[in-house]
Image: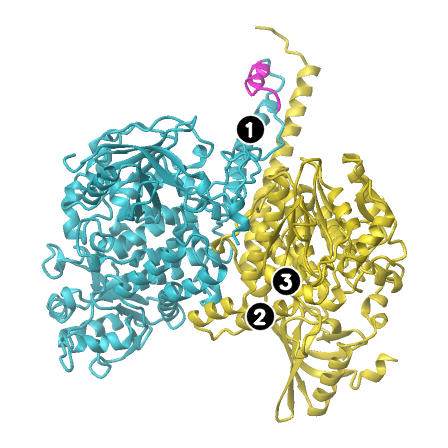
Amino acid sequence: MEFAELIKTPRVDGVVLHRPFMPTVEGTLCLTGHHLILSSRQDNTEELWLLHSNIDSIEKRFLGSLGTIIVKCKDLRMIQLDIPGMEECLNIGSSIEALSTLDSVSLMYPYFYRPMFEVIEDGWNSFLPEDAFKDLEAMTDEWRLSEVNRDFRVCTTYPPLVAVPRDVDDDTLRKAAGFRHGGRFPVLSYYHKKNGMVMMRSGQPLTGTNGRRCKEDERLINATLRPGKRGYVIDTRTISVAQQAKARGGGFETEANYPQWRRIHKAIERSNVLQDSLVKLVEACNDQSHSMDRWLSKLEASNWQTHVKEILTTACLAAQCIDREGASVLVHGTEGTDSTLQVTSLAQIILDPACRTIQGFQGLVEREWLQAGHPFAQRCSMSAYSNSKPRHEAPGFLLFLDCVWQVLRQFPCSFQFTEQLLVLLFEHAYASQFGTFLGNSAAERVRLSLPEKTVSLWSWVNRPQEIDHLSNPLYEPNSLVIWPSVAPQSLLLWEGVFLRWNRSPRCQEEAHEEMVHIIEYNKELQNKVNSLRRQLAQLETQEPPLQTP
Amino acid sequence: MEHIRLPKAENVRLLNRLSPRRSCVGTLYLTATHSIYVESETQVRSETWVLHSLICRLEKQVNTSTGSPLLIHCKNFQVLHFVFPQEQDCVHIQASLQRLSQPEQYEELYCFSYKPNVDEAERKEEWSFLNLKAEYRRLGIPNSLWKSSPVNQSYKVSDTYPAELYVPESATQQVIVGSSKFRSRGRFPTLSYYCKDNQAAICRSSQPLSGFSARCLEDEQLLEAIRRSNPRSDFMYVVDTRPKLNAIANRAAGKGYENEDHYSNIKFQFISIENIHVMRSSQQKMLDVCELRTPSMANFLEGLEGSGWLKHIKAVLDAGVFVAKAISEEGASVLVHCSDGWDRTAQVCSVACVLLEPYYRSLKGLMVLIEREWVSFGHKFSHRCNHLDGDSKEVSPVMDQFLECVWQLTEQFPCAFEFNERFLIAVHHHMYACQYGNFVGNNQRERQQLRDKTHSLWKHLWDTRGDYINPLYRTDNCQSQGVLRPSTAPYCFKFWSGLYNRFDRGMHPRQSVEDYLMAVREETVQLEEQLASHKEVRASAKCPKCKSVYSEEGPPLSWGLAPGGFVPQAGTPQDYSGGFIASSPCQQRSPVDGLAFTPPQNQTSEADLSVGSEQESGIADVSFNSQLSEEGPGEPDPDDAAYSAA
């Protein structure tokens, strides 16, 4: 298929563009295979380059022969295009609709994108499981890297290499995989250096209604416990949801078969509920005519903040079991690809200072989301404005980013990165020129040849100028575990995403600039004083005083 | 002292509302001015001081197996939950505090026994720190359009107005007196703020006694004179800040609002802000939500919505925005009134001033504004803050709302204000604490004598201003200049946990950007000094003396960590250490006379950045510094109830 077939009108002159908090621009609208471009051909105005894949939905309106298209983007921005001519407007509208909903992955922009920057380090190789395991090896010999999933046969959503207890052989893993949802047998997610406790994740056990058990599964997870120690199973579902799962072949670890484990149920919601919640929240944020009562009641009804609180609380609990109770933890929900990953990744933010650096955070996203098989393609194919009925869409990753932002807000000096990195990941998870978030699992990424045919987002992020842009001027490495407050008063609406297009960023930018200025000036003075001191010290040694008192 | 039925109760437990495991046992002492709780089981002496004038409600709960609980609710939103092993002790303590917290005369208030180490001349000097005459001069008043009027010199025309008032040049004594008779409590229209740039003015008054048809020629003339004092505009606004229905209801009582037909060239406008009773109950509802033990997000948001509090804050800010726009964009003068003109009117005029003029966004400017619009124009602080045992229906958080409006603005314009959140909280605290004489009394006339024996807060805040500076403030950026144009969309309003959950320290960010930046700036100042002195040394390097100069400086320092011993912080799981420990006067910089108790000199980690001599009043927690090292991360303090409460 050629893109040209989909583009009914490639260009229209005299189009007026309205964007939030930017001056209106009049110019020529061009449609290419992957972009909607508006250019005024004047030097002083900013052109619009919008990826079709960033368009969530459009709305057409007509007033006489003047058509208006409101483009609603997945990053929650809304822009308006006034297009002279009814036919042109209709053509543009239907072309955008077709181009923004391409079915085939191989037609996506990352396959066509050629980087305009020099790739210093190929992001596809930046966070390999082998490298992560080397760090683990330096701390303990209780774990090994298993190749049991080399060809993705044991578990289609796991990477080829996973860390498992050293004493458990691959055969046991295969059998345990048969007892876990999607073959997702318990694997190592995090090793807590301080006390050697671990966090594992998996899919739900397939106990079913007749209480199946699996000796290998039991052996596998018991192998992670130190002698005489107990562990915690954190089931992200409520007990009743977990009970209901039995009817569909799923279930949970019963006390009888897992006597060394204490099970805790939490209540993290599932995909369609979350999607619905996002739609309601964004709708509430976009209606400026609300009274205070209506705003607060819509905010409450969206339940978004409730999800944030629940996820963060569960992650804190997992971290607390590990760090304070000195117990190992197994986390799972149903599939183990959504709420499970929210909990395991956030717990690491809390526990592990390394995850709060720019590189470390990318590594975390790579490990706990991309490699761990969060189905990004399915979850992020639509955002808050989509008119189509959601199938597998869910803002699980966005919720994770929101929770990280909450922790960052409470510990503003403990993260090497600013909110900007989180916003950037949100944008790229939904629409990107990079191949990082394409596909649903490691297996799919291999099948799609993404590392060979597309550029990694990490290649772009890890350039000095981008790192500089994302760095937090207030950062002071903090080696401690950081315990956030989960009281409702402490959890705020993430303005940087949800109110981003509703108000001018100017004042916050000014504050940030001032912050940078204060710190830069201080550093400059430190350097000056130190260099003067060195000069003085040299002067002294070179020219000893003529007289001694 | 005669009110203290029991000076000391032992083995009293102080419960930690949010994490019960942090509760402690100690001894409660009652002094003439403070209740002091001393923990008995800690190695470091830990105390909680509560000023009696801050106590607003004592709640004795039913006895439990562990003893008799007594909840002390304070006006600064601290809640102390004591459990007494002996019911008799509880009863005596409650009765004593009941009396001690509700003095019958001004002389019993803390400000009359508060004697810092300051001689009489200095004390007098404190009161001249702010000078309203100078403030009007700063505004360009008097000038050819506005003059000072001696009409209220002896508080004869209006006993709740200040003596010094400014009126239009053309307004005669007879017009003023005539108008004052047509206004509630004689509060005739008078100048509040004058905009030098375009000559538009904000005036304030009480409601007219118009009833259904009454009119007053002098009042009409006075408004006309006000309009004429703004030669560039051919009309003026009259803003009634009450809901229309309330204003109409007032007509039946012979009061009401201006009839547009009787006054020439006015545009009349209602802006509904609810009355003091609605505000009082709204705040109480909000505080109930704040005090929920483990609220869900839905409980909290529903409660917040149900309280209506943010709606009222928005109404006040909206009204301020309306007035500021009329002045700055339309160049029209505005007369603002409500019923008596000392609550909503003060809110709206002062919010408008903060929006209009950068000066009021400075530390001293806000003090001046509060002094002018609230203190001098007769906001009834004694009644509204319930300083004396009085009518509970007169109590209302009107000034709280003004401070919150300013806080909401600081959130929208982080570089526009010279002061920080701590300053607003300090003002709030002192408004209720009665340690200083500023907010005692209901109007200037009443306050005349009171000031002879008390100290002034403003000088004290000014002297300790280092604690209240916003490091991001710059006079030369675009948000600090000109008129602020805030958004008043509902989502711009946040819940102010820094004030209402002030003592629940576990809820606040564990690291403070502001404190961090202040520490960096302090270090920067030192570096600048060193740089200068090193340059000097280098310049005279060949001089034989150089060695001695240099060696005084000591060996080169390493500038590794941030200044001020700023240690990275972690807290503990759900660290709701509360404000209990923090609110005790942990460090004292100057000796305090007149206190039955000398606070001990124990130091906790947070001492350095907090407010020093202020602490004898128990305000220590105005510093939200992020030092939480009292909760070392290695300390085993598992609080599994916290995250797993399911």
Identified at 62% across, 40% down, the residue is: A323
Residue B473 lies left or right of residue A407; in this view the side is left
- Looking at the rendered image, the disc whose residue lies closer to the viewer, 3 or 1, is 3
Q: Which residue is mark 3?
A: A243
Element class at badge 1: helix
| Mark 1: few/some/many CA within 10 Å (<14, 14-19, 20+) | some
Discs 3 and 1 lie in a common subunit: no
Chain in cyan colour: B
Disc 2 to disc 1, how far (Cα)?
A: 53 Å
> What is the span of residues highlighted in magenta in the rendered image?
B545-556
Which residue is at the front of the view, B183 or A250?
A250
Q: Which residue is mark 1?
A: B530
Using the rendered image of the protein, determine whether residue A467 is visible from the camera's viewpoint: yes
Name the amino acid, label 3: Gln
Q: Residue B551 in magenta?
A: yes
Residue B244 horizontal/vertical position (percent): 28, 77
Residue B256 lies left or right of residue B431; in this view the side is left
Residue B105 lies left or right of residue B268; in this view the side is left
Name the amino acid, label 2: Val
Chain bearing mark 2: A
Please report contact status of discs 2 and 1: CB closer than 8 Å, yes or no.
no
Quadrant in the picture for residue A44 = bottom right
Which residue is at the front of the view, A329 or B193?
A329
